Amino acid sequence: MSLLKSFASNSHLFNQREATMAVIHASPYKVLSQRTCSCFRKTTTANLFYLRGSSSAELFSSSKDKRFSTYPEGEIGSSKRRARGPVMAAKKASEGVKQDEGKYKHTVDLPKTSFGMRANSLVREPELQKLWDENQVFKRVVERNDGESFVLHDGPPYANGDLHMGHALNKILKDIINRYKLLQNYKVHYVPGWDCHGLPIELKVLQSLDRDARKDLTPIKLREKAAKFAKSTVKTQMASFKRYGIWADWSNPYLTLDPEYEASQIEVFGQMALQGYIYRGRKPVHWSPSSRTALAEAELEYPEGHVSKSIYAIFKLVSASPSLGSSIDEFLPNLCLAIWTTTPWTVPANAAVAVNGKLQYAIVEVDPLLGDASQSEGDKKRRLGDAVKGEKKPFLIVALDLVPALQAKWGLNLSVKKVLLGSDLENCRYAHPIEKRECSVVIGGDYITTESGTGLVHTAPGHGQEDYATGLKYGLPILSPVGDDGKFTEEAGQFSGLDVLGDGNTAVVDYLNEHLALVMEEPYQHKYPYDWRTKKPTIFRATEQWFASVEGFKEAAMEAIGHVKWIPPQAENRISSMTSVRSDWCISRQRIWGVPIPVFYHKDTKEPLMNEETINHIKSIIAKKGSDAWWYMKVEDLLPDRYRDEASNYEKGTDTMDVWFDSGSSWAAVLGKRDGLHFPADLYLEGTDQHRGWFQSSLLTSIATKGRAPYKSVITHGFVLDEKGFKMSKSQGNVVDPYTVIEGGKNQKEAPGYGADVLRLWVSSVDYTGDVMIGPQVLRQMSDIYRKLRGTLRYLLGNLHDWRADDSVSYNDLPRIDRHALFQLENVVRNIKESYENYQFFKIFQIIQRFVIVDLSNFYFDVAKDRLYVGGTSSFTRRSCQTVLATHLLSFSRVIAPILPHLAEDVWQNLPFPYTWEDGSPARFVFDARWPPSNEEWLSLSQEEVDFWGNILELRTEVNKVLEIARGGKLIGSSLDAKVSLYTSDENLASRLHEMCMAAKEADNLHRIFITSQAEILESLEEELVGNTPYTGECEVQGKMVWIGVSRAEGSKCERCWNYSPLVGSFPNHPTLCRRCHGVVGVQPLPSVAAAVS
């Protein structure tokens, strides 16, 4: 069985930038060198070699349907050059077709296997999945493996709606990794998870109810319905994931609504609170009026095309700063501060105007209009305000560097009258444009530039992060006269009840214009934050919220990022940049469906009650009863014993936690609690958008409580686009649904069901580190490649139907061609392993496509058919070939198993011989067999021998070209009708070729490799011989010229193998056979099969 203990270990590194050339350049895999590409380039794989840097989808779209192989459908490795007469005759005879001549048909060893050419995936894959489930294969393999533990921690998808192609890409990538680790003897632990709380589920529940039902909906009833909806969705999504062929601990998933999970989340919150990282404050946050809740940065999106109403407004100065004294008195009382804002609705909350202390500012005189600026540049939406239309024009203060730009924009002549330093303007006083109060000029930060606007910034600490920071510095009031619904409150006076993003915004602009405070109004297109769930714009609004003070541990987080392995490497820059600018994390939400923030408020003072004792008590309650207890239990029951007497003075908080805090606590709830798992996880794998989502929230909670990242390595993948590179959209009709890909659509002709393995093959084919593409054409090409790979495996199975381990031929006794085949195989398996280790699955796809489907089929399998079919059932030449085929079958069924588990298992269940461990126990399933062990002996082929086989393959390519010309000239029909003559002046090459012609082992004979009846090496090249040779050609092999001649084969045609030989007719008992066939038939009498030859 030594030969069946296959091969692989890490070998030579791939060049990441030249992935499509990976196999060609992976020394010592030099047999398929670049110089042999001239033939292949014209037949099968031009685009595979020369589209460096192209994605697999691009490679496919530029290839023809038949570009991946030269054999016709159903006949793997077949070639026009190969005579198929005896094979076809035997096939027809076996099918009951009458033959005039077929005397020796029963001596032809045709392939036999129950493994079908058609995958029948819609039936077979569920059968195989049922087989795995019934035998608990995943669990058994994990328990049997005795290597290290491997934990890929699952990022929880949201339990809301059906799965899309992004889910499929993500879960299949994870499964490929887990299955590979299983084959490498790891104890793989993969617990699938779901994110079950949050607004989308709450909205789904509310949308399903009519108006009357909503009125009667109590918080606890809403939570019950939300939990029911989430669990139902989990069940549906889980079934879909299983259909993808995903192996996981499906019986014990983690759900963020499970009591034990919620308790762990409360524990993380408590640890952060006790360390001083959690605080309550009134500060501006992203607020969604459409959802009526605060949002985190990860819950925002910035769609293209948003247009805001921007204004240039003026605030009248009433007094100069002490540093200016009377130096600007000449401009008073008509001197104004000019500001620019894209949020006019925030002007009622204005508390200051900020300047940059280092910039120069100009007092400008506004002269009469030079033209109608409202119509300039064809923009009819731009309009000048009444402040500059009257005869009496104000003096304005603007940044000196912006005077030319403002003059051009406003269509006014701005004459500089005086230049001031920004620091001199500090403490100037101005009249609020709406309210009857005075405000100050303050010094802002570096955010004040001369890139746009006026160089002076309207500051409303209740509506902007930078404004808030400036407000804290100067003790400014935090005004925010806006309600949860996004409408002005009574605090806004005359604007009360108006929508700040609608009529309220317009009303403020109109008021400013009526009171001569508007210079210009114009539309402004820019990126603006939208609620990612409702797809509606948000606002910045100061509210009382709970925050995590990221500043308290940001430095530690940044350091931890550097200790994590990021794939691709540029992902480190992405998360570093996002974390470095991260402000404090607003973790409270004004919703019902979520984990409560465990805090009580004093009814009179509103002071929060939250300490170690209260948090631990609530955690213990939630661990037993779930977070619903917060809503149905009384305050006195939620408080620890020593606070019971004071319960009447307190009320429960109503805020829930940000869902990113939910999922960001999964490392604690899962890795830290479940048997077999460990912290930190070996790997996190999610989409690139999670750099500001789950990757970051998990990092922050882990750093704050554990002081280290929750993951050792992180892989990110791109988004899935259609095959033209566009974002998928239902309105565009370009959505590719994974369910339809697997099961097919309503019209099976237009949308056939390809099965899960074809979808998985696509996942392996793309460079997932960037955006990937999929569509009908790509899927058809994937299906074609899958079918050819299946055909290759069927060829192996069929030709091993009568082979057993005892028939194995030792390595040293193998023909040279077989030893060379094992050398290639060992290198390929090693390169595949290296690609798995580096998570570069697209390289595996390319190796399989190039070697297994193309090169193996087109050369070794093609040449092998002669000795497999007509070499004699138990002959050495057939058994040696079967030995090599068996190693290929056992190796490739395992190395493809992580990507194509159904195909690999289907092959394994159809093995014609048992595969057992050293202790004699059978490997019933492909994942029982582990990864093929490395075989150094197969790599011991000398460099000289490797190079020689490179020459042989190159020469074979050139010989085939001359044979094709001879066939075109009607000299021959099949290649077996030909005799090939070769001449080279290089004595060493000539000697080696001559050895091949006289090889002791028939499989090494040169004419067998050329698939011709004869081949000879000429000692000299006579003119007469050249003149008498019908077809000739020349080629260069390693700089040496080789002359090629093709003529009709000598002798008569053997009835059994169709080779020509002068000895046909020399055997009275079998006058139509050649010597080889006579010998085979002699020990294999008709019609019965002879006993095996020892």
Image (tube, helix red, strand yellow):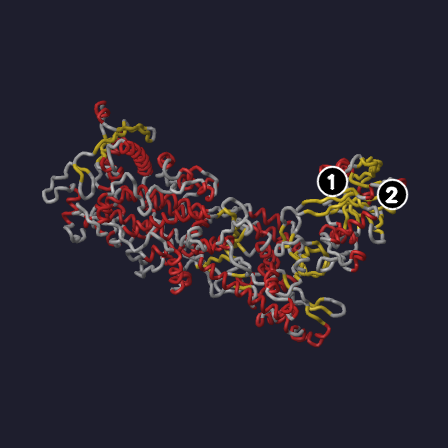
Which of the 4 image quadrants contains residue 1062?
top left
Q: CA distance from mark 1 to mark 2?
A: 24 Å
Disc 1: CA contacts within 10 A as few (<14), some (14-19) or many (>=20): some
Quadrant where the N terminus sits is bottom left
Which of the 4 image quadrants contains residue 282?
bottom right
- The mark found on residue 450 in the picture is 1
- The mark found on residue 1015 in the picture is none
Closer to the camera in the image, 502 or 341:
502
Closer to the camera in the image, 596 or 71:
71
Counting residues from the start of the chain, the first of labels 1 and 2 encountered is 2
Q: Say whether residue 307 is left or right of residue 204.
A: right
Quick one: SS at disc 1?
Answer: loop
Closer to the camera in the image, 400 or 828:
400
Q: Where in the figure is residue 1023, as x and y percent of width and height?
A: 23, 22
At x 63% / y 52%, what residue is drawn?
Answer: 555
At x 30% / y 56%, what residue is drawn?
Answer: 114
Quick one: SS at disc 2?
Answer: loop
Check the image and name the residue furthest to the top: 1023
Residue behind mark 2: 334
| Residue 140 visible in the snapshot | no
Q: Amino acid at mark 1?
A: Thr
